[in-house]
Image (cartoon, rainbow, N blue to C red):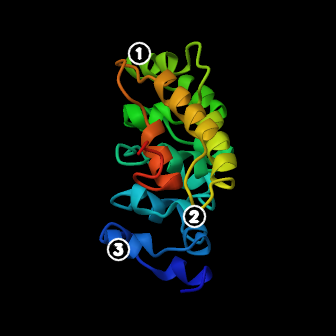
Amino acid sequence: MSTDAWGSVPTTAFGRFTAATMRGLTAASVSGWTAEQFAAVANVGWIPEAAASAIRPEQLSRVTDFDTVSARWLNALSVEAFAAIPADGVNQMSLAALQGLDATRRGIAMGKADKIHAGYLAAASRDAGISYDSVLAMLTGMQSGIGADGLSVDQFAAINGMLSGAKAVNGGQTYVSSLLTSMIGKDAWRPA
């Protein structure tokens, strides 16, 4: 469907789109929706990350249900679009999503968060030597150097140190190991 054709789709239809339909959307499709159409979507988290970058600020300004979106999805939004999320939306975000926000989006969210969610953000940010951005940058760099025989000893030591230093608000594991898994494969980083 062309970008211009979305205007003729009734707003009520957007609330009936299935997850499979939403996951097949392109950035051009999503950018063609009105703010009213976008607000009618049952679950914005079903929109693919690749299409999230095309979401406009005015589309997000009326959405408050963000409990199923990931940090990766939120970080894919433009800074302007993320800033348009209302306080009620920030306060629907999961702990994992808030912990995984990059520094810019974390700062924006802090200004809108209620006391509980501000605590999550502050704890995730406090004296953080490891952030989502630094982990992603390191893993992306390491991924390009992984050979057919797996990680080198130095690469594994760097990852192991990074994982042991990353703690969630409750002191447990964070998103880091799942990020690692998605970057280099389920068991590729485990020692033999």
Query: Between 98 and 59, which is closer to the camera in this rendering?
Result: 98
Residues under numbered marks 2 and 3 in contact, where contact means CB atoms less than 8 Å apart: no
Q: State the CA–CA distance, disc 2 to disc 3.
A: 15 Å
Helix, strand or loop at label 1? It is helix
Mark 2 vs mark 3: which is more N-terminal? 3
Return the residue at label 3: 20
Q: Is residue 67 visible?
A: yes
Query: Between 1 and 35, which is closer to the camera in this rendering?
Result: 1
Q: State the CA–CA distance, disc 1 to disc 2.
A: 32 Å
Front: mark 1 or 2:
2
Q: Residue at x 65, y 47 (%)?
A: 142
Label 1 crowd bin: few (<14), some (14–19), many (20+), radius 10 Å: few
Q: Residue at x 42, y 31 (%)?
A: 174
Label 2 crowd bin: few (<14), some (14–19), many (20+), radius 10 Å: some
Going by the numbered disc 3, the residue's amino acid type is Ala
Mark 3 vs mark 1: which is more N-terminal? 3
Query: Relative to residue 107, is residue 46 drawn left or right?
Result: left
Q: Residue at x 42, y 57 (%)?
A: 44
Query: Between 80 and 100, which is closer to the camera in this rendering?
Result: 100
Return the residue at label 2: 50
x and y, in percent, of residue 192 in the image: 41, 45
Return the residue at label 1: 115
Going by the numbered disc 2, the residue's amino acid type is Ala
Q: State the CA–CA distance, disc 3 to disc 1.
A: 36 Å
Mark 1 vs mark 2: which is more N-terminal? 2
Q: Residue at x 41, y 35 (%)?
A: 96
Going by the numbered disc 1, the residue's amino acid type is Lys
> What number of labels is visible?
3
